[in-house]
Amino acid sequence: MHRTRGISQRLKCQPADTHSPFSDKVFLPPSFLSALLDSEGGGMQELPSPITVRIAPSNACCGVRGFDAEEGTVRVPAGMLEQIDNDGAGGDNSNSMVTVEHVRLEKGEFARLRSLESEKNKERGQNEEVGNLRGLLESHMRSNLTVLFLGEIVRFPVGGRREPLSFEVVALEPASAVDIIDVDLTVDIVDSGQSTQIGGSASASASDKLALDAPQPLDIEVASGATHMMPLLIPPQADAVDIVLECNPGHDASLVASRLLRDVSEIDNDWSDCSAPSQSRKDLRVERTQLPDAACTIYVGVVVAAADATTAPAFKGKVSAVSAKRAQSSDADVSEPEDGIDGSSLVCANCRTSVPKANYDMHSLFCQRHNTRCEGCGAVLKRNSAEAASHWHCAVCSEPGVVGDEAKHNRLHHTPCVCACGGGSEEASFESALEMAEHRRTDCALRLIECRYCRLGVAQGPHAGSAEARMLGMREHEWSCGSRTITCARCNAYVRIQHVATHMQMHDFQDRQRRANMVHCANKRCDRERAAGNPLGLCAACYGPLYSNAWDPGYQKLLKRLTRMLFAQITQGCGKGGCTNREYCAAGLSESEAAARIVPIVRAYAPLANPAAAGGRPNIDYDSIDLRLCGV
């Protein structure tokens, strides 16, 4: 680490309002930029890249995003604030005074990071599954980090997890703090508990896996306020899958599932059934059109909310998954019964059932005495029954149900929620949890997607500012990831990753166009393009054995060489095993028969010997010549 002489300032830490709280880039005041440009008597002609600083008294090093902070302050992202420990006691370091000094760091060559996830999971008694851990870490480092230093805690969010992943930097080469911009950094990831293999995914136990078309449903028990996760493998031949949860009497839970999320909830999911506690059966249908063509795994969760906990110590139920046919659209119209066309039946005014006309009076008296009709939803209930006593309507939306449904209904339908993607702004506020769940499935910047370019599960990010990105349906991450360039193997041009498919289509079109307009070699056994200025109409490969630099104005010597080659080929063969040129290679003909077959070919080239007769340019129909040479 090399410090630049005299460039240091005493500044007050302020939290940076940035879309990436896990970045290590700070905002400095303009006076720091002036001091950097004036360092060493103004000898610095241009700013170093990247600009790196050290925040004392800690050993935290970081990059610089800009010089627009207020004078006397340094704006630090939330993740870096945790790295700055002035008193050694940890805690919030905002508004504390620090010394910021410019340093020049060596380029990093090697880094070893220790995963802190196994320790957290051991404390929670969990074994959480994380996807391509190494790919996610390297993607985060490439996009958000400038520097690594010993003891740094690298944190980054992963879609499908409520808490970020954490790694500790335990070894670096060649120094204790290194620059990782534009370097080939070797990253070694170790696990502190050695309980899982880093870079892969922890496998769930056999008892936690939900099998498709299993002979018996899976019995589960979930504590109040917890979520039970189960992976489900769906084969490519399955048109649709029905997932069913049967709740035991007196128990209730929500059934949710996701394609990528490993930590689902009633808000974070792709499919959900959060119906009322009075409905003991919860079911989901996953269609093949919602999944990739190949076999894939979805994650099914049974969510037991603490607010809905009953007197039972834990939720109990059965979960099953069965293959189903793809749902077909139906145009059936369900309407209330009408009076019979012929007048033989009437509709009861109380229960709305169709009754024969002869029995209508008796039915009406009985129905009015024993049944009551709810004015709100039209449900027919027995008078003075437990069902009628527990019948309930929401005071806000008039949703029908039973009294026991009120708590869950109010929590999901009438509790305002704020999504973290908007930072508490009005645009991210929703009137209910279900509205926010729909937002999290579609437009939320934190929605987990599988990037079409890096194939990692990442947050889709906010809308990209480019009109092209909006037209292509790309969010910020995919637009940034697809804007990286690679070299085309065919033309060596630099092409954006998102344009590779179009670029290769252009090459295919050029190949088809070239083949369509190509003038083929006169040799019927060759598919190459005819060489320009070739008197025999052959390609360069076929003409090579016949070429000579001797003076031959009438091409007589060339035609003699062609005659000798054809005669030897027909009578003796080309000498190559497996030759399929049967009529013109060792055809078993006599010399006179071979000569009779060669004469029409040589005669077709006769205009070459007297170009003056053809107006100075021999007019030869090469396509009509039945020339078949071997060995090309």
Image (cartoon, rainbow, N blue to C red):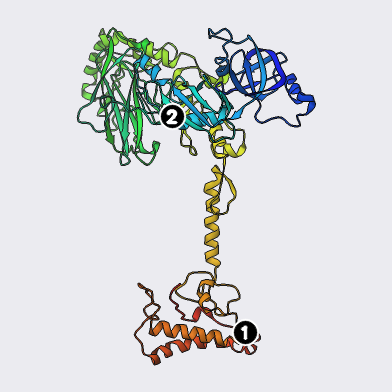
Q: Nearer the viewer, residue 548 or 492?
A: 548
Q: Name the quadrant containing residue 350.
A: top left
Q: Which residue is mark 2?
A: 133
Residue 434: x and y, percent? 44, 20
- SS at mark 2? helix
Residue 489: x and y, percent? 53, 51
Three-letter amino acid code at the position of disc 1:
Trp
Q: Quadrant of the N terminus?
A: top right
Q: Nearer the viewer, residue 358 or 371?
A: 371
**Horizontal relation, residue 165 to residue 617: left or right:** left
Residue 69: x and y, percent? 69, 18
Q: Nearer the viewer, residue 229 or 275?
A: 229
Q: Which residue is mark 1?
A: 551
> Which residue in the rendered view is the most extreme toward the left?
215
- SS at mark 1? loop
Q: Name the quadrant containing residue 389.
A: top left
Density class for disc 1 (Cα within 10 Å; few <14, some 14-19, many ≥20) is few
Does residue 541 lie above or below 111 as drawn?
below
Does residue 625 lie above or below 221 as drawn?
below
- The alpha-carbon separation of the residues under discs 1 and 2 comes to 72 Å
Identity of the residue drawn at 76% across and 31% down: 45
Three-letter amino acid code at the position of disc 2:
Leu
Q: Are marks 1 and 2 in contact (CB under 8 Å)?
A: no
Residue 96 badge: none
